[in-house]
Image (cartoon, rainbow, N blue to C red):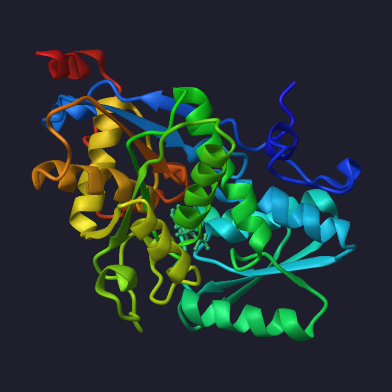
């Protein structure tokens, strides 16, 4: 039986006491070659794969890092964890803390996280604290609180988070038998791009693969500090998960970009929402807006002619979170849905 990524990749994730592992059997997520979207965007010489991290136990990639961070907190005898979050980290921290019998404190930007994520943190039993500020403000608060209070910080500044998250790279290499030519993913606080790069490099150093991908990150236009090389004091985007103006892993992310000969670019909210629709309508996958920055970025690269045209390439896009967490971007109160009487004659007209 599959028992989570710490067990699966124990060679790369040392733990002292197996009985202290805190897991929900995360990882081992769907890795799928897209059938229709590549054609729809005029891409003929690439295999486009998506890694649907929305199928993790709490619906996002955060579970990979959280199993490791909470396991280490458990090993150390910690009784509580704390994090700042745009929603997914708080959901994940709350769930893993629940399993471990710990308390979770989560600080979120008031009214700026998707309702599904807020519901998760509440139902898993976390102490939810909304602050009148953005994610960057909340992160500064929890860093200070974790220095003075008896709580373990589980944001990605905690190095165990990136250790767990690097397993996404292992799974992709295991599935393909090589590293993809491009790894495309959204960038917010910049931990994930850093973790994936670490994972690919470790697999390469251990001769599990003989190639490395170009790390290709995408930020939202209104929250693009790395792209523009300046802090965004008031970040804004519909992709609330990546509404971040001063990423904690900024330096690691630019190192991943530069060492891999990759790029970090930006996409607009319109491009993100179009990509989200296209992915769902063409290939049946519903990912949250931030995740679709990777697909929007792929479309942008194709339009700009930035990808190799003279050979077949493998592109892997990380879909970081599940679309069901944030349905308000699709369905809202002003939406007109056709209404019919429950009358077969009336309904039959639909098929003419
Ligand atoms: N995609 C989703 C769905 C996310 O929730 C996040 C980050 C990212 C992408 C960006 O990843 O921060 O490693 O660059 N969400 C954090 C949170 C900030 O609090 O849930 P990153």
Which corner quadrant of the image does residue 343 belong to? top left
Residue 335 appears in the picture as rendered: no
Task: Determine the residue positioned at 42% across, 77% down.
Answer: 246
Please name whichever residue, 236 or 128, is drawn nearer the observer in this view of the structure.
Answer: 236
Residue 230 picture location, percent across and down:
31, 80
Q: Is residue 3 left or right of residue 308?
A: right
Which corner quadrant of the image does residue 58 belong to? top right
Residue 240 appears in the picture as rendered: yes
Which corner quadrant of the image does residue 145 belong to? bottom right
Compared with residue 341, is residue 256 higher up or lower down, i.e. above or below? below
Compared with residue 184, is residue 312 higher up or lower down, i.e. above or below? above
Residue 177 picture location, percent across and down:
47, 23
The quarter of the rendered structure image containing the N terminus is top right
Please name whichever residue, 190 or 238, is drawn nearer the observer in this view of the structure.
Answer: 190
Please name whichever residue, 125 or 153, is drawn nearer the observer in this view of the structure.
Answer: 153
Task: Determine the residue positioned at 70% across, 32% down.
Answer: 8
Compared with residue 54, is residue 233 higher up or lower down, i.e. above or below? below
The quarter of the rendered structure image containing the C terminus is top left
Residue 125 picture location, percent across and down:
73, 58
Q: Is residue 178 left or right of residue 264?
A: right
Residue 316 picture location, percent across and down:
36, 36
Q: How many marks?
A: 0
Task: Determine the residue positioned at 23% across, 59% down.
Answer: 269
């Amino acid at each position: 039986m599959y028992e989570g990524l710490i067990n699966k990749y124990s060679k790369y994730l040392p733990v002292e006491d197996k009985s202290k592992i805190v897991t929900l059997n995360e990882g081992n997520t769907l890795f799928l070659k897209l059938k229709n979207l590549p054609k729809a965007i005029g891409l003929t010489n690439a295999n486009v794969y998506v890694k649907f991290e929305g199928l993790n136990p709490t619906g996002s990639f955060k579970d990979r890092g959280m199993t490791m961070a909470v396991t280490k907190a458990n090993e150390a005898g910690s009784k509580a964890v704390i994090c700042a979050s745009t929603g997914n980290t708080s959901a994940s921290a709350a769930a893993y803390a629940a399993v471990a019998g710990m308390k979770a404190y989560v600080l979120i930007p008031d009214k700026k996280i998707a309702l599904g994520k807020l519901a998760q943190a509440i139902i898993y039993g976390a102490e939810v604290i909304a602050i009148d500020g953005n994610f960057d403000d909340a992160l500064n608060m929890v860093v200070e609180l974790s220095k003075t209070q008896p709580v373990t910080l589980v944001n990605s500044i905690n190095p165990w988070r990136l250790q767990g998250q690097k397993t996404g790279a292992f799974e992709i290499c295991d599935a393909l038998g090589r590293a993809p030519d491009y790894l495309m993913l959204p960038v917010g606080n910049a931990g994930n791009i850093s973790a994936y790069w670490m994972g690919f490099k470790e697999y390469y150093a251990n001769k599990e693969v003989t190639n490395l991908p170009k790390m290709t990150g995408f930020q939202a236009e209104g929250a693009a500090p790395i792209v523009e090389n300046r802090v965004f004091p008031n970040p804004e985007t519909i992709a609330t998960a990546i509404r971040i103006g001063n990423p904690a892993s900024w330096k690691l992310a630019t190192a991943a970009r530069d060492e891999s000969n990759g790029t970090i670019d930006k996409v607009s909210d319109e491009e993100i929402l179009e990509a989200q629709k296209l992915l769902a309508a063409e290939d049946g996958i519903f990912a949250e807006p931030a995740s679709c920055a990777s697909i929007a970025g792929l479309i942008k690269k194709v339009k700009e002619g930035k990808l190799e045209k003279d050979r077949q390439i493998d592109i892997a896009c990380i879909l970081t979170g599940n679309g069901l967490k944030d349905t308000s971007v699709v369905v809202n109160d002003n939406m007109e849905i056709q209404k019919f009487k429950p009358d077969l004659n009336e309904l039959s007209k639909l098929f003419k």
